[in-house]
Image (cartoon, rainbow, N blue to C red):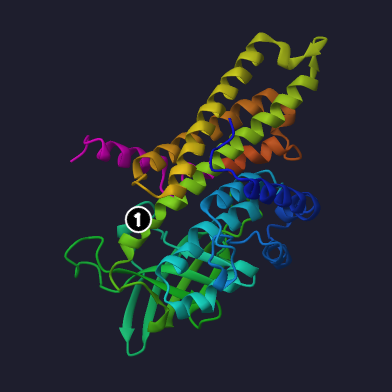
Amino acid sequence: MEPRYLSNEHKAFREALRTHIERHIAPNGPSWEEQRRIPREAWLAMGRAGFLCPWVDPQYGGSGADFGYSAILREEMVRSGSPGLSEGMAVHADIAAPYLDRLGTPEQKQRWLPGCVSGEIIAALGMSEPDAGSDVAGIRTTAIREGDHFVVNGQKIFITNGMNCDLIILAVRTTPPGKSEVRHGGISLLVVEAGTPGFIKHRQLDKMGLHGQDTAELFFEDCRVPVSNLLGEEGRGFKYLMQNLQRERLIVAIGGQAYAEWMLEKTLAYTKTRKAFGKSIASFQHNAFKLAEMATEVAIGRAFIDRLVEEFIEGKRDLTTEVSMAKWWTTEKANQIAYQCVQLHGGYGYMREFEICRDYMDVRAMPIYAGSNEIMKQIIARRMGLEE
């Protein structure tokens, strides 16, 4: 059943995006993954076509589009053949840039949002540290005020777009640990621009999958950031992060669902044509049952995701519980389906030249980032009254 939020404009947007992907991304995706980098021109081309941050207000270069367009972008980019660009775009357009829109002053928005829309600015979000991943309140990077600047010192890790970013929205402690009344107090958000002395892009990390995506380790050594780059109010960063995490986790959930659908679609086509013992391997009862089970799970996930996107657009109620459910469910199912799809491909599924092999490695990160699936279940349990 077609989602109720889809209009003719949404459908036209999807078709235009598919055309762009077929012409400009799919032919280049495999080489980008091998080179382990996405060229800036790919970002600029997406910007020129209107596919970066379409939700941004027209006065800052966007189209003022609803979240349905972000969902379409996530779904179609999963199928683009460039998981590196797909993940980088998701973080840029629907995880990092919304902080600028939601918390920025008019001057800050005018300074950064047009570049985010055009692709001239690539944005990143700096939360994770070596000793603070899902435990956001445990961050240690400090920003001590000296006159008109904050002096930032610390380290961030697993930062998507970290090597290519032009700016990073950085979670820092403006109140030293132990000086705040609560553990999560004293956290603020700063915009740090690339090229700022002391902002060191240390190295691109060597990952299991998503090779085209520049996940980085970053250092900040006496990095002086203007006070005017503070996003929102000082000391309220933890609250801002928790609020924006719902959009981030929904984007991840949409990606998990899209991956599951795409892997099943490819595997169904393969098993119908692959012959063994004189007939297609899809016709063997065991394999047919596996495919039927996966199709059922994918259909359940699709109904849940479509409803959540619709409710997120409406914005009438808190969706924290449901978004947490969707994030763990779809990413868990994507990994289970990836395993079964590799198995149904046999030896070919183990070969990197086959997409399903690369998919298997790419989706493995999904239950880990944006808050691990264990944290999602903890949130759900707490909101059910099952934890003190």
Residue 165 in sight here: no
In the rendered image, the quadrant that contains the C terminus is: top left
Tell whether 142 sits left or right of 258. Answer: left
Residue type, numbered disc 1: Met
Asked whether the viewer can see residue 335, the reply is yes
Q: Within 10 Å of the Cα at label 1, are there few (<14), some (14-19), or many (20+) other Cα atoms? A: few
Measured as percent of width and height from the top left, residue 170 is found at 43, 69
Taking 207 as reference, is 321 left or right?
left
Please name the residue shown 73% across and 35% down the image: 351
Question: Which is nearer the eye, 269 or 55?
Answer: 55
- Identify which residue is drawn at 61% across, 41% down: 361
Residue 356 lies, in percent from the top left, at 68, 35
Whether residue 56 sits left or right of residue 235 in the image: it is: right
Q: Nearer the viewer, residue 31 or 273?
A: 273
* Highlighted range, magenta: 364-388
Task: Give the side of residue 149 with respect to residue 25, left or right.
Answer: left
Q: Quadrant of the N terminus?
A: top right
Outermost residue, right direction?
278
Work out whether residue 218 or residue 53 is closer to the camera in this orientation and state it.
Answer: 53
Position in image of residue 292 (x %, y %): 61, 18
Q: Residue furthest front?
A: 8
Say which element carries label 1: helix
Q: Which residue is mark 1?
A: 242
Residue 22, x across and y down, in percent: 78, 49
Q: Is residue 10 magenta?
A: no
Quarter of the image for residue 298 reads: top right
In which quadrant of the rendered view does residue 229 lie? bottom left
Q: Is residue 372 a member of the stretch shown in magenta?
A: yes
